[in-house]
Amino acid sequence: MPRVAIALEVLFLLLAFGVRSALHYRRTGSTGFRGLSGEPLSAEWWGGVAFALALVFAAIAPVRAEPAPFEPARVVLFVVGLLGTLHAQRAMGTSWRIGVDDREQTALVDRGPFRWVRNPIFTWMAVALVGLVVMLPNAWSLAALLAMVVAIELQVRLVEEPYLLRTHGARYAQYAARTGRFLPLVGRLRGTPLR
């Protein structure tokens, strides 16, 4: 099972980051990478650190796992998370980015999976990591999932949502009031001040 997990993790990184960035570059002339936000030791910065730790822990998880026979049922959740991530990235079109650049104004995407949740890419990435825990139930896979949840929460709440409110104002506030943050209807914003 550890070898299957390694292969799936590499596939995830290649497709969700490598191929996606190459396609984005072909369409826009930019890879979509904007980097991480915040001053060192700020909450935003810690979000970036947590994301990097999640990747490191996920890479360690198969190395530290006990050898086990391949069980197809244990990979389903990871594959579903990968496919969901790719679908949500595709739905973003040219608005897809990793990180935020305050000087840019991307279109507000509210179609496809974004009709139901504001952050479907992050939702599906978390599903993939839950799948990793199912494939490799060890402390490293669990640490990867927990670090990713912290990273996502910090990135969304302290970087992306404030940026989207500044950029799209009332339109984003209305969208966020009717659309869940990570799950349908859960985490809708109420009384959001426009900044």
Image (cartoon, rainbow, N blue to C red):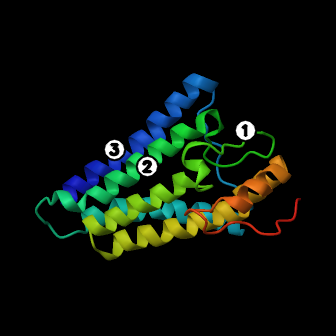
Q: Name the side, left or right, on which 6 lies relative to 52.
A: left
Q: Name the side, left or right, on which 64 lies relative to 186.
A: left
The residue at the point 15 percent across, 60 percent down is 71
User: Residue 84 — which label?
Assistant: 2
Q: Name the side, left or right, on which 75 lies relative to 182.
A: left
Count all numbered tags in the image, as a single digit. 3
Q: Which residue is mark 3?
A: 11
Label 3 environment density (alpha carbons within 10 Å; few <14, some 14–19, many ≥20): some
For badge 2, the amino acid type reads: Gly
Label 1 environment density (alpha carbons within 10 Å; few <14, some 14–19, many ≥20): some
Q: Residue 136, located in which quarter of the rendered image?
A: bottom left
Across and down, in percent, residue 60 comes to 33, 63
Pick whichever, 111 or 162, lies toward us: 111
The residue at the point 70 percent across, 60 percent down is 178
The residue at the point 14 percent across, 66 percent down is 67
Q: Is residue 102 above or below residue 90?
A: below
Q: What separation in Å lies between label 1 and label 2 (alpha carbons)?
A: 21 Å
Question: Mark 1: which secondary structure?
Answer: loop
Question: Mark 2: which secondary structure?
Answer: helix
Q: Which residue is mark 1?
A: 107
Question: Mark 3: which secondary structure?
Answer: helix
Across and down, in percent, residue 6 comes to 27, 53
Q: Residue 27, located in which quarter of the rendered image?
A: top right
Please indicate, yes or no, whether residue 41 appears anywhere in the rendered image: no
For badge 1, the amino acid type reads: Ala
Across and down, in percent, residue 162 comes to 78, 58
Q: Is residue 64 above or below residue 111?
A: below
Q: Earlier in the sequence, mark 1 or mark 2?
A: 2
Pick the quarter of the image with the C terminus: bottom right
The residue at the point 62 percent across, 62 percent down is 181
Q: Does the CB distance between marks 2 and 3 fall below 8 Å? A: no
